[in-house]
Amino acid sequence: MKIAIAQLDYRIGDFGKNTSRIIDCIRNAKSKKADLVVFAELAICGYPPKDFLEFNDFISLCEQSVEKIARCCIDIAAIVGGPSINPALKGKALHNSAYFLKDGKINQVIHKTLLPNYDIFDEYRYFEPNRVFECIELNGSRIALTICEDLWNIIDDPLYIENPMDHLIKERPDFAVNIAASPFSYSHDALRTSILQKNALKYKIPFFNVNHTGAQTELVFDGSSTIVSQDGSIFKLSSFQEEIKYFDLEEAKQGQGFGNYFLKNKSELIYLALIEGIKGYFQKLGFKKAVLGMSGGIDSAVVLALAAKALGKENVMAVMMPSPYSSPGSVSDSIEMIQRTGVDSQTIPIEAAMKAYESILSPAMAGLPEDITEENIQSRIRGAILMALSNKLNLILLNTSNKSEFAVGYSTLYGDSIGAISVLGDVYKTEVYDLAKYINEIDGDIIPLNIIEKAPSAELRPDQKDIDTLPPYEILDQILYQYIEKRQGPVEIIAQGFDELLVYRICKMVNQTEYKRFQAPPILRVSDKAFGSGRRLPIVAKYLG
Amino acid sequence: MKIAIAQLDYRIGDFGKNTSRIIDCIRNAKSKKADLVVFAELAICGYPPKDFLEFNDFISLCEQSVEKIARCCIDIAAIVGGPSINPALKGKALHNSAYFLKDGKINQVIHKTLLPNYDIFDEYRYFEPNRVFECIELNGSRIALTICEDLWNIIDDPLYIENPMDHLIKERPDFAVNIAASPFSYSHDALRTSILQKNALKYKIPFFNVNHTGAQTELVFDGSSTIVSQDGSIFKLSSFQEEIKYFDLEEAKQGQGFGNYFLKNKSELIYLALIEGIKGYFQKLGFKKAVLGMSGGIDSAVVLALAAKALGKENVMAVMMPSPYSSPGSVSDSIEMIQRTGVDSQTIPIEAAMKAYESILSPAMAGLPEDITEENIQSRIRGAILMALSNKLNLILLNTSNKSEFAVGYSTLYGDSIGAISVLGDVYKTEVYDLAKYINEIDGDIIPLNIIEKAPSAELRPDQKDIDTLPPYEILDQILYQYIEKRQGPVEIIAQGFDELLVYRICKMVNQTEYKRFQAPPILRVSDKAFGSGRRLPIVAKYLG
């Protein structure tokens, strides 16, 4: 049996394009004598469709697409993910389903059993879980067909009561197919691979997994669809790009031609994911050009390098907005960086606007000392300038804040925290430095060394340094990682050897600045716990606050 | 048996205060010879605790609170909601539980069976559902104890497979207790009452329901705890305030002294909820004073009236920020409104800042015609001024955008769309007019008639009117209501008789402006479908876009 794994980039709700891509692949696979072609979870509508699933109209369009695709499945079979209506009187309206298409029609519909509802996942919001288990059959082979999470309960501390494969294996399937929508994080491919391998070794059959590729606003899908032979050898489709790959079942069972599989390192993974994330946002919304503010610091330098790589240097405008507090070094570092990347630039000094605000605000603020207000005004002037350029020149504003800043609220709401999409909002400051070094290694020395080596500063008052207000990033980021990624409370973090007062201060800062992150742009997700829909916290609360 | 229903306002994560309030109530109830005192769902930690539930430290604090409360339950019993750890090897880590406390200890723990995971609810994110059913016993009476949603499957098209009361009724309980966290919407109390009444009539026992009161960021809890006699008579605790009410079980069974129950009208409900929402945000975060921009239009006038009512006129500052495009009428209407409410005010003309931006931006925009950019700059100047006053004078900025504007993106990102909390973001423009008239009826003619009667305008260019860009609000709001609240697709809305082109245009506008709402402030929820966590849609998508 010849099996095609179609790893594609779908657009949410673009039924015309998704359907025609799927049909093209089926025709192509047929011309190559494939018996079965497999597409990803919810490929019909794209992932995540979110509350569009609550519109009957949207579900009808999904059904029409499935029927259209089914009609093309003559002398070839296909598996494709899409929502299906739950016919039962009781329970939620939909299932998250895998349609098994052959002989020109829908042959069988298999539903997802384990519905992830943690982190960025909300599947139980829409779908009723499956409760019956049966294999599908093709040309005399039995196939254990599951959907993503269905394979993930094979752990010591299982999140669900059921384990679908334990039911399906009773029918003695010849192989397993798992259609998935498994978003990227820098540690996820290793975990995903080990989960699939555990399944293959436990059930002693080969597993064919297919994932999405491409970015959907905050979520990046890395592809990396994974085939595991019955003895646990691994074959990976490419990462961060579309690919259709053909497998002979008998060869795949034995892992013939699988070669070795190497995990990429963290900075490389983050680099690839962020480039894909930027590309996806622009391509899918039909935008070409980006704008960003250049402060002379590491964050904007890294965003500039990534944007130039993702969109082409001719599509990026870097804007310098010096104030009287900008150091000469910041301006010259920015100019150097702009020259090395070859992007367009503008220099727009903000002092005239600072003076205008000072004059119109002085009656209301007479006699009050300077404080954070004046710093925020500078940041908001820069925000307004960038948005004006965005509006006037049809440029999309890239946010340049990093995860450490978002975490402790070290940014100005409606100032430097703005943008259509945040590139580094899930990358801690220390990781930004690693990323900068990685960029310089592989893209030539694009980021001036001085930008990497100088002390971080917001430059909103004379001689300001981040270290005046924050602990060193090496310490801060470790505490933040424990609190955010690992959900360790202060007591547990202190037990790891961190300073008690510092830990409480930082955890409090994180909790008390939730109101700022509530209004942050979508943040490209690269970690297991990004700010945004994966981390949901109340604003008005007192815990550690 | 004497039963006390304690309808309280809890603060999320404030274990000290929540616990001492609960203990005070128990002592008080004991002094009044009550046998049982009942507190709301997740009263221990406040609702919704969201991802704080993922912190072991938070759960430990919950457990310690329950134990402390249990020790006070001597010669009196209490029911109190809190999370509990799921002892099973499989399944999610927690249950959403009702602790039955008596004889100084935890006598029994009952778990929630039906976990709402729609709209603003994410309970399946954290909790494993209950699968065993048993009544609790007190002084020879059997009590069917359920948690909120557990009673809600009594509908024709049930969302869940189980119906907990069908199991519990087999043990022939004498009465039922339902602890809830049921947030306000203007139509919810009627629905909630009918659901409870249906249960009482079906199972022929009295139901004692207890709800939260008070606001938790976007969510307002209206109290309105509901007692239903076994023949379906209704007794309501007060709405939007704390109350402890005592019932004799035998009298309650017969509905003795229940009187008549009247539903409040929509504008009154919205009025009360918004005032509670503002109050709650300020009180719980420890702020006193608010600032808002006064445009001369209806939205800012209504927000001013509500803020003055909620916080006291001495705690509200209204800021007029006229531009050369402001009509003389807008300024005089604003002044009139400020005088009638007696709040503080500031007038800060924005022309100097407009000119500064014009001059600093002119090199980058040379030769390009005026467009929306210049309008947005005005709006962002006003935003920056309000934030400067907020920073300098420790005032909390109230957002004044309405739901119609948020829906179609008729607002400037980082301009008029900003604020710490949005007062009218879940109130359509036509509903804002109704609210204005209601305010004038009950608070005296506080809003000048001219503000109510003139044509809406953003006043960002000469003679601009909303109607230049948008359909009349009477039509727009009906289409939006069908699309947003009712999840009707364009085909279904057109079938109701609306113009085809207009319907498609509006639905597209809603979808295409999701990126603006993503960065909107928290919006006080008064409808069944508010923007925010109750409505989750992808930004990068093509459906109707």
Image (cartoon, coloured by chain):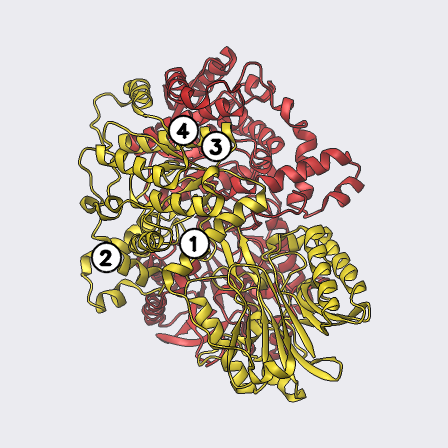
Chain colours: A yellow, B red
- The residue beneath circle 2 is A474
Instruction: Work out how far the residue at label 1 is from the one at label 4, CA to CA, in angstroms.
Output: 48 Å
Q: Amino acid at mark 1?
A: Leu
Task: Write down the chain letter for disc 1.
Answer: B
Q: Which of A165 and B161 lies nearest the eye of the viewer?
A: A165
- The residue beneath circle 1 is B8
Q: Amino acid at mark 3?
A: Ser
Q: Amino acid at mark 2?
A: Glu
Residue at point 20%, 56% (across, down): A502
Q: Residue furthest top?
A: B328
- The residue beneath circle 4 is A385
Instruction: Work out how far the residue at label 4 is from the one at label 2, CA to CA, in angstroms.
Output: 33 Å
Please tell me whether mark 1 or mark 2 is closer to you in this view: 2
Are both tags, 3 and 4, on one chain?
yes
Q: Amino acid at mark 4?
A: Ile
Would you place residue B453 above or below residue A82 in this image? above
Residue at point 72%, 46% (across, down): B489
Q: Position of residue B418 (x, y in %)?
A: 44, 35
